[in-house]
Image: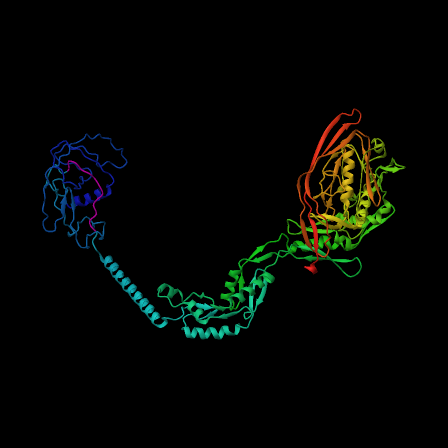
Amino acid sequence: MSGQPSGQAETSSGDAQQHHNTTSGDDSGAQPGVGAEQHGPWPGQHPQGQDQATDAFQPVGSEPTEQATPPTEQVTPPTQHVTPVDDAPTIVGAMPVPPPEPSGFGGPAGPGGPHGPGHYAGQLPGQYPPAGPYGGPAGASGPGDPNQFATTAFTEPVAPPHQAGPGDEEGRSGRRKALLIAGAVMAALALTYLADLLVNWGDVPRGVTVAGVDVGGMSRTSAEQKLREELQPRFDDPIKITAGDVKTELNPTSAGLAVDWQGTLDQAGESSLNPIARLTSFWGTTEVGIVSETVPERLRNTVTRLVENELNHPKIEGDIKFEPTGSGDEVDAVAVMPRQGQQVTDVDAAIATIETGWLNDGGVQLDVTSKPVKTTEEGVRATLKQVAEPAVSAPITMEGDGATGVLTPKVIGKAFEFKPAKDGSLKPKVKRKTLREALEPQLASTEKEGRDAEIVFEGGEPTVKPSKVGRQINWKKSLKPYLDVIEQSDDRSLTAFYKETKPKTTTEEAENLGIKEVIGEFTTGGFADDSGINIRTVAAEVNGAIVKPGDTFSLNGYTGKRGKAEGYVEAGIIENGVPGSAVGGGISQFATTLYNAAYFAGLKDAGHQEHSYYISRYPMAREATVFMYPDGQSVIDIAFTNDAPTGVAIQTFWTPESVTVKIWGTKHYRVESKTGPKTNIKEAGTKKVKSDDCTPSGGIDGFTVTDTRILYDIDTGAEVRREERTATYNPKPEIVCTKKKDS
């Protein structure tokens, strides 16, 4: 008997993972109660007197036998309750469930396993639960019930409830100690917090600094006294201002700055009630700055001037300049270092920063917006050493045919232009025009001037003046090795290369142009003496000009700049409808004369503009004005196109009283002009001019008029086409002069 319970415990525990159902051939067997746990017999045992088949226990390593278990109708029999006696374990189904017992021998924590060596809780060694008829514990159906093993489920053994042992007592004791310690710490912190409140209530918070002066934890009176002692000496010191790359100073008195001591302490605040804030104040510092008393307008004006005159500056790209050394044409190459531009971001913010920080020991830092540059100081120095300094170290010569030109260091430096390169250095660019202007006079004797064929008028008839082929220096080719030569210390010379210049109009072309007769001419007069000088000058320039078939003649384009250097003088003009004077005045009369000559020659109008008001010495709707800026830029021009198959030449005649223009060529048309009546007439008013230089003049009515040009074929007399031109003239008011001294 003593061995069976022990074997049962070992088996049921070791085979807990094998769960099988054993089907009884007797459907009338009693079933355990709902939820009861049953354990089968020990290995190799079968209920005596029962014909049972079971696979509950298979030998280790054997193959399990597959069995089909037919559905069994489950009938729950009446449950028999067995009242436990004394300390006997409670039996549920086929497994004893021990009652709760204090931890001790044979308990869960005892030796030998979960319940000790084969004992149940609450039993002494050698004591066992009541046995059933097959050696197992008695079931709930009563001892020896043959049906108690009819259906057996092998499951994990049910662990008994945990019973407190000696270790649990120690855990509870440790927890009590931890709670006591925590409570003591909290109490100590609370007492410290209350003491801190009592000692520091109403004072400047700990960790507060004003302009770098630590006043944290002090009373307001003490804090103010300390601030006055340490900051008062700084009142007369200039304020250090830093803005980007600029460091300067500002006089606080001139700027109207002073300190509001009480306002500063109010800004510092009072001690916080927050325990965390009070705790962290032992380690941190807070700069609150000062509260200033200012004269706002004076401070703003002072800061604005400082920003505009010193703090803001444009960016300066790196460059190289050439400065004279004082000895003739020698120069030194000097680097201009790059400097990024900057601008104070916000003047109002700058004023606020100065107000709060002007007494800071380190001064005030103002925010700026930077404008970066493309070059670097290293890149500029590299270009200076590698290019600029070698370039002006000695003169450069150009050898021509029979003459030598010299480029001095001064000219070499003047011809340089430097631009930022991608690597931060400077890229040199040479102004070849500067070099050419210096060399041309020295090498002019080696060149031969070319000439176009011209039409000259000798004895009243046109004659061809032959063209000439020129020989000129090819400047592009001659200056190509220049950048290599300037880097050399020896053999600093260039060679002049020459090219032939063919005339635009050859002798043969001029002779074949068909220029043989006058095809159009016109004369005007009545100009002033000063205007007459300019008319004579421009007429001499245009005389002999040739216009090939298909080409267009432009007066401004042909003469170019008409200034004092070209022989023109100041004379009368019309500016904004009012008479005035300018260099080149009176040229409009020659323009009107040229326009009418081309008009009657049957040439195509390529653009012209009438005067703003009508001038009586010119035909209505058949006149023109011209204008250009002093630099020679054309503004108002007169032009015509030679649309004939033959060429034309212009001949001019000037006298002190008149100017005549003749167009020579081959006549193709007979031209008539018909001028219509004036329409939309507008009366002239009166305009008073207050000026000592005013010249009075009569008024001219404004009107609109149309001119019609009719072209007839010279051979057949048939009309070829009609061309209408309508001009509108503004009224010109009568000018009444009022002297300034009389007004």
Q: Nearer the viewer, residue 192 or 417?
A: 417
The dominant secondary structure in magenta is: loop
Q: Is residue 154 inside the magenta stretch? A: yes
Write the residue at 66% across / 49% down: 421
Identified at 60% across, 62% down, the residue is 310
Is 472 colored magenta in this rendering?
no
Residue 545: x %, y % from top left = 81, 38
**484 or 105: nearer the viewer:** 484
> Is 369 left, or right, of 689 in this rendering?
left
**Toward which corner of the image does residue 265 lie, by quadrant?**
bottom left
Q: Is residue 241 left or right of residue 724?
A: left
For the record, the magenta segment spans 149-161
Which residue is nearer to you in this view: 547 or 469? 547
Question: Relative to 340, is 514 on the left or the right?
Answer: right
Residue placed most toward the observer, 518 or 254: 518
Residue 494 seen? no
Q: Quadrant of the C terminus?
A: bottom right
Q: Residue 133: name its quadrant.
A: top left
In the displayed structure, 241 sits above or below 691; it is below
Residue 437 location, x and y as percent? 79, 49
Q: Is residue 513 left or right of residue 214?
A: right
Q: Residue at x 57, y 60 (%)?
A: 244
Q: In the rendering, at what x and y percent does residue 134 appear?
A: 13, 40
Q: How is the image coloured?
A: rainbow
719 above or below 442?
Answer: above
Q: Position of residue 601 (x, y in %)?
A: 79, 33
Q: Quadrant of the N terminus?
A: top left
